[in-house]
């Protein structure tokens, strides 16, 4: 039976992407590969109509965290004074990365799932002590969509630069590329783009790449990848097959109407899941209008352990996701990214009924 992944990556892929991944054997030193690489870079920039003169899409091998790490390690100068906004696991990961790469940082922390206090952000930025902000757009820990546009506007007001983890929002939520403060976003092939794991990317301003920052890493140094990719080369073996899949996934995204159409589709799926669960007495962790279109988190029903819910749904062909850390015993998460049909949704509703009612 085909398993439908309701996890926040990897996602269920289309048959077209599945075929594309194994379509051909491709050597990464051949012109066919560089055509593919050029095509993927262009299509990534075109999703949000980023101007190719101002923005670069840099492809790297690795998971979403590799892209976030490459962004942090490559784009923060030695004298940066970074403010990290935390309200979940991925915000905490930004701080961890700052620590590992010896970047001077401070944290504005909200409890997991809580809102980021924008007044507190403004106060910190007004102090003049901050040069950069790092934030998570969609905090996948709880499904909270952080206000990227407002954060970018505050950064612009105080002449501070913004780095955004958009790993679970790129290609499905609105991203403030037009804001002068936004320097870079990190993303991955295997979430809202509907590709397979192994390929990640950072979209960043060309000015940010040109800062001549001393490398903090060899294989995650974005200017190295970017410089090679600009002249139809690659420094290391890239994720060739993931790139074949992504090229197809990007064609499908375009054909389906781009990121806005994807957001509309995801919103419908998320609302349908919430409605089915609501009928069964399952409560949402966050209000719908504070959640991303990508994922919503729910309270585990009384008397039903996560393992029972997970295993029951798995028998019906659906893979759901647990809460992280202290939330593991209280929460479950349903992501509706990926290739999910209306038929799958009807089947999911029946699966909920049989596992939760029992
Ligand atoms: C999935 C995710 C990541 C990266 O996860 P990987 O497991 O490294 O792919 C980073 N940030 C956010 C917000 C995510 O949802």
Image (tube, rainbow, N blue to C red):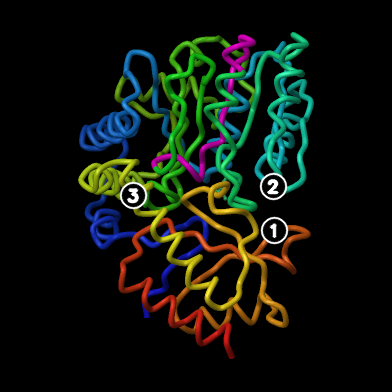
Residue 18 is left or right of residue 165, and the answer is left
State the residue position of label 2: 89
- Respond yes or no on whether mark 1 lies under 8 Å from ligand 1: no
Front residue of 18 and 186: 186
Residue 39 is left or right of residue 148, and the answer is left
**Residue at 70 percent of width and 19 percent of height:** 122
Q: Position of residue 9 (x, y in %)?
A: 49, 55
In the rendered image, which quarter contains the N terminus? bottom left
Circle nearer the viewer, 3 or 1:
1
Tell me whether circle 2 and circle 3 mark residues in contact (CB < 8 Å).
Answer: no
State the residue position of label 1: 324
Residue 295, numbered label: none
Q: Position of residue 164 (x, y in %)?
A: 56, 30
What's the magenta region? Answer: 155-171
**Residue at 40 percent of width and 61 percent of height:** 269
**Residue at 50 percent of width and 59 percent of height:** 335
Q: Residues within 10 Å of mark 3 (few under 14, many from 20)?
A: many
Tell me whether circle 3 and circle 1 mark residues in contact (CB < 8 Å).
Answer: no
Q: CA distance from mark 2 to mark 1?
A: 8 Å
Q: CA distance from mark 3 to mark 1?
A: 31 Å
Tell me whether circle 2 and circle 1 mark residues in contact (CB < 8 Å).
Answer: yes
Q: Position of residue 72 (x, y in %)?
A: 62, 27
Q: Position of residue 197 (x, y in %)?
A: 45, 52
Residue 290 lies, with reference to residue 334, above or below; the image says: above
Q: Residues within 10 Å of mark 2 (few under 14, many from 20)?
A: some
Q: Residues within 10 Å of mark 1 (few under 14, many from 20)?
A: some
Q: CA distance from mark 2 to mark 3?
A: 30 Å
Of the numbered discs 2 and 3, the one sitting upstream in the chain is 2
Front residue of 61 and 293: 293
State the residue position of label 3: 241
């Amino acid at each position: 039976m085909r398993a439908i992944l309701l996890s926040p990556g990897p996602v269920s892929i289309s048959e077209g992407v599945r075929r594309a991944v194994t379509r051909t054997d491709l050597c990464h030193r051949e012109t066919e590969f560089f055509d593919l690489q050029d095509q993927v870079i262009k299509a990534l920039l075109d999703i949000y109509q980023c101007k190719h003169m101002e923005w670069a899409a840099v492809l790297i091998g690795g998971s979403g965290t590799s892209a976030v790490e490459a962004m942090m390690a490559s784009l923060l100068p030695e004298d940066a004074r970074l403010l990290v906004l935390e309200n979940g696991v991925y915000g905490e990961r930004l701080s961890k990365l700052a620590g590992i790469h010896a970047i001077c940082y401070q944290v504005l922390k909200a409890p997991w799932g809580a809102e980021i206090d924008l007044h507190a952000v403004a106060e910190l930025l007004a102090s003049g002590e901050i040069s950069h902000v790092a934030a998570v757009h969609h905090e996948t820990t709880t499904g909270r969509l952080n206000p990227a546009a407002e954060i970018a506007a505050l950064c612009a007001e105080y002449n501070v630069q913004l780095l955004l983890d958009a790993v679970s929002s790129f290609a499905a939520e609105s991203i403030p590329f037009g804001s002068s403060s936004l320097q870079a976003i990190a993303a991955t092939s295997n979430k809202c783009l509907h590709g397979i794991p192994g390929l990640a990317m950072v979209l960043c301003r060309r000015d940010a790449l040109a800062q001549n920052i001393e490398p903090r890493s060899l294989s995650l140094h974005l200017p190295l990848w970017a410089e090679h990719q600009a002249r139809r080369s690659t420094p290391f073996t890239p994720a060739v097959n993931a790139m074949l899949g992504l090229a197809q996934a990007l064609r499908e995204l375009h054909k389906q109407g781009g990121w806005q159409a994807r957001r509309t589709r995801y919103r419908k799926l998320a609302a349908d899941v919430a409605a089915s669960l609501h009928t069964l007495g399952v409560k949402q962790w966050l209000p719908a209008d504070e959640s991303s279109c990508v994922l919503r988190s729910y309270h585990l029903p009384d008397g039903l352990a996560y393992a029972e819910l997970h295993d029951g749904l798995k028998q019906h062909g659906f893979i759901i996701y647990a809460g992280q850390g202290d939330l593991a015993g209280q929460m479950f998460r349903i992501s509706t990214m990926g290739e999910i049909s209306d038929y799958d949704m009807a089947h999911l509703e029946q699966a909920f009924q049989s596992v939760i009612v029992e």
